[in-house]
Amino acid sequence: MATFAARKKSVEKEKRHIAILGSTGSIGTQALEVLEANSDFFELEVITAQSNSDLLIAQAKKFRPNTVVIGDENKYSEVNDALFPLGIKVFAGQDALAQVVEMEPIDMVLTALVGYAGLRPTIAAIKAGKQIALANKETLVVAGDLITRLAAEYGVNILPVDSEHSAIFQCLVGEFHNPIEKIYLTASGGPFRGKKRDELLHITKAQALKHPNWVMGAKITIDSATLMNKGLEVIEAKWLFNLRQDQIDVIVHPQSIIHSIVQFEDGSMKAQMGLPDMKLPIQFALGYPQRLKSDFERFNFANYANLTFEKPDYNTFRNLQFAFDALQKGGNAACVLNAANEIAVEAFLKDEIGFLAMSDLIAHCTDKVSFVAKPNYEDYVQSDEETRRIATQYLN
Ligand code: NAD
Ligand code: MG
């Protein structure tokens, strides 16, 4: 019996213990599917959500994590009443989010929450030595230099979940000592590919929320329609792969089969391809360095006679250009870009501004917010606040 118990313990120890921040979202729910399909490999420790208490409770009842955090403090009693009898610890609020990631058994934190809110818990997780599976690209956009410096200091890997960055990472496995000449981030082009500015004036929320190839949360779906998502990904790639701006190119590939491309110094190009399904990059990040078996649908060449490529239209989709400009400018410029964009998308989703006005608002903030050349954490927090204030004034 003793031997059996010891063996069981060692098997258990080999399991990877996961925290999912933002478990009720598009990435979060797909991550739970990955964990469920690989329950021998993963153990769920923590799940969190901002306000969807019903789904959070249902997930906790099913997956029995150790701890749950609800962002909205008004929903604490509802969640606690439901989960306390099951022995699940419940906390509420942003401070709790930054604290739970430090819990001892956690090996890896999947940041599947949306927006600037990811910054603080990601920093806390890195400082606690947890590996990061990063979906929350906004964190790297806001403070890429700080995050990558901390990750190096604490010996933490940041494993990309974003499909393009996962593609590049997959191409780099076995190539880490070979310099990258250039990367090509592929973009679907979104629902308005080929349209000109005058055709985008009266775009509605419903039209912008219909993405041709991916089903995602509302914010990233709007970002995909404006190409801001690709802009954020350019900045994300800079920090993840330590690239100069001129080493990053964007190519529109409407079928979303080639997820991105690395070009090495001998001219050889490696691409990673497959059907668009976020479960694959989620699983690759959570399981790295292993490729876990999956039953995801396989690509069938017969269904794709053509894979096509075109240049992005930087004049119509100004946000993509803004992202390159922010990289060029450095300092807090990308933090300002991100905050202005979060306010712009929120206003568009509330029908307060039109589709093209989102870019106007971002340009206004870029102009008005004070520039900080070498920001520290407090500077980022302040730039974020200042941008939100200036953006809100502009809207009123
Ligand atoms: P979503 O809106 O579907 O889900 C967001 C999750 O974060 C929810 O669980 C929500 O409760 C939580 N959340 C929202 N605001 C919060 C706050 N202020 N504090 C704490 N938690 C909060 O979003 P999503 O589409 O799953 O995207 C999540 C992240 O992953 C984003 O950064 C997005 O850019 C990135 N990403 C998503 C996809 C995708 O296919 N959905 C692909 C690549 C990258
Ligand atoms: Mg992406």
Image (cartoon, rainbow, N blue to C red):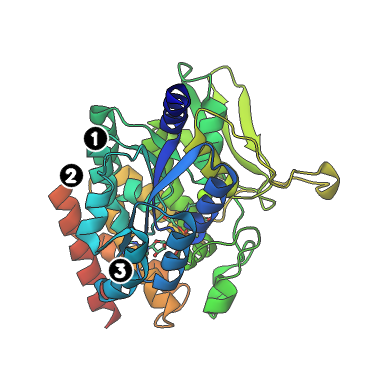
Q: Quadrant of residue 362?
A: bottom left
User: How many residues crowd mark 3 within 10 Å: few (<14), some (14–19), many (20+)?
Assistant: many
What residue type is disc 3 on?
A: Asn
Residue 327 in the image, given as x and y percentages of width and height: 34, 44
At mark 1, the secondary structure is helix
Residue sitting at 41 percent across and 70 percent down?
Answer: 345
Q: Is residue 67 above or below residue 342?
A: above
Task: Please state the horizontal and vertical placement of residue 250, each as a whole percent of the image.
Answer: 54, 44
Answer yes or no: disc 2 within 8 Å of ligand 1.
no
Q: CA distance from mark 3 to mark 2?
A: 45 Å
Which kind of residue does numbered mark 2 sit on? Answer: Ala
Q: Between disc 3 and disc 1, whose residue precedes?
A: 3
Q: CA separation, marks 3 and 1?
A: 34 Å
The answer to whether any part of residue 90 appears in the image is yes
Query: Disc 2 or disc 1, which is closer to the eye?
Result: 1
Residue placed furthest toward the front: 1
Comes first in the chain, label 3 or label 2: 3
Residue beneath disc 2: 373
Of badges 3 and 2, the one in the foreground is 3
Q: Please tell me which of labels 2 and 1 falls first in the chain.
A: 1
Residue 390 lies, in percent from the top left, at 22, 70
Q: Quadrant of the C terminus?
A: bottom left
Mark 3 vs 2: CB contact within 8 A:
no
Q: Amino acid at mark 1?
A: Leu
Q: Which residue is mark 1?
A: 150
Kindly check if marks 2 and 1 are in contact, taking CB atoms under 8 A apart as contact: no
Q: Secondary structure at mark 3?
A: helix
Q: Which mark is residue 80?
A: 3
Badge 2: few (under 14), some or many (20 or more) residues near its Cα, within 10 Å? few
Question: Ligand 1: does it lie within 8 Å of the C-beta at label 3?
Answer: no
